[in-house]
Image (cartoon, rainbow, N blue to C red):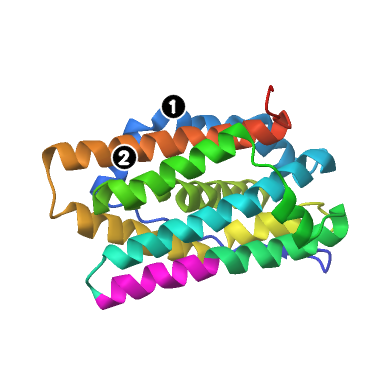
Amino acid sequence: MTESSTLLEQAVVIVPPFARECQDQAADAWGASFDHPFVTALADGTLDSRKFRFYQMQDARYLEAFADACSLISIRIEDPDTKLWFIDAARLAIVVEQQLHQGYGEKLGYTPADIRAVELTPDNRAYQNHMISCATRGSLTEAIAALTPCPWLYTALGTHLAGRLGTIPDDHPYAEWLRTYADPGFVTYTNELLGILQAVADHQSGDVLNRAKEAFAVSARYEWMFWNQAWNEQRWAV
């Protein structure tokens, strides 16, 4: 490792049985994210900064909804430790938003006020609506399953790219983003979420688990669509 690069420490995602079932049901959408041109260009540093700016501003608004979903789930949970986990997860979503977007906002020329004013894309709005609907109207298993693809997929992408790159040059235009999601601490967070999902699913069966797997699969599709809406700089048709 040189002074101009960062060695990426490898960490392992531990996938419990129910999470594996969810991932298997969403296999096509899950795998497609790894091959999306936005992701591959982000990894090799050739992604147009305009597209990344578009993505970052939409992502900031998405993370607000993710935090809301975690807060709603925390209200429904009786176990104090698990309740606190989701409260902390809501806080973490906002912290990640602020840290990533403060740095990139300065580089790419947008402010917190610009983020508040940005119009949600159709796909971003639909994803948020799906997640909040599951958090308020679905079973607890469904609610947790619907928000799991976001951190899990980002962790999977981060560790995959870490294994491929080995080191991230400090002059890589998206080094901070890559380091965030390859960080062992983020892997630990994902493992904790997958463990909670398994613990909740252990007390359910039949239709409840089927609906949870479907909610997971829909979110996995929306994850691919999120890359795509940024790649195409999606706008409302009318």
Please say if 72 is above or below 21: below
User: Residue 129's x, y, as percent?
Assistant: 46, 42
Neighbour tally class for label 2: few under 14, some 14-19, many 20 plus, Cα within 10 Å: many
229 displayed left or right of 83: right
Residue extent of the magenta highlight? 80-92
User: Residue 86's x, y, as percent?
Assistant: 39, 67
Q: Tell me which label, 1 or 2, sits earlier in the chain.
A: 2
Q: Is residue 191 magenta?
A: no
What type of secondary structure mainly makes up the magenta span?
helix
Q: Nearer the viewer, residue 176 or 83?
A: 83
Q: Is residue 87 magenta?
A: yes
User: Residue 178's x, y, as percent?
Assistant: 67, 54
Residue at horizontal 83%, vertical 55%?
Answer: 110
Going by the numbered disc 1, the residue's amino acid type is Asp
Q: Quadrant of the C terminus?
A: top right
Going by the numbered disc 2, the residue's amino acid type is Cys
| Snapshot quadrant of residue 7 | bottom right
What residue did someone put label 2 on?
A: 22
What residue did someone put label 1 on?
A: 28
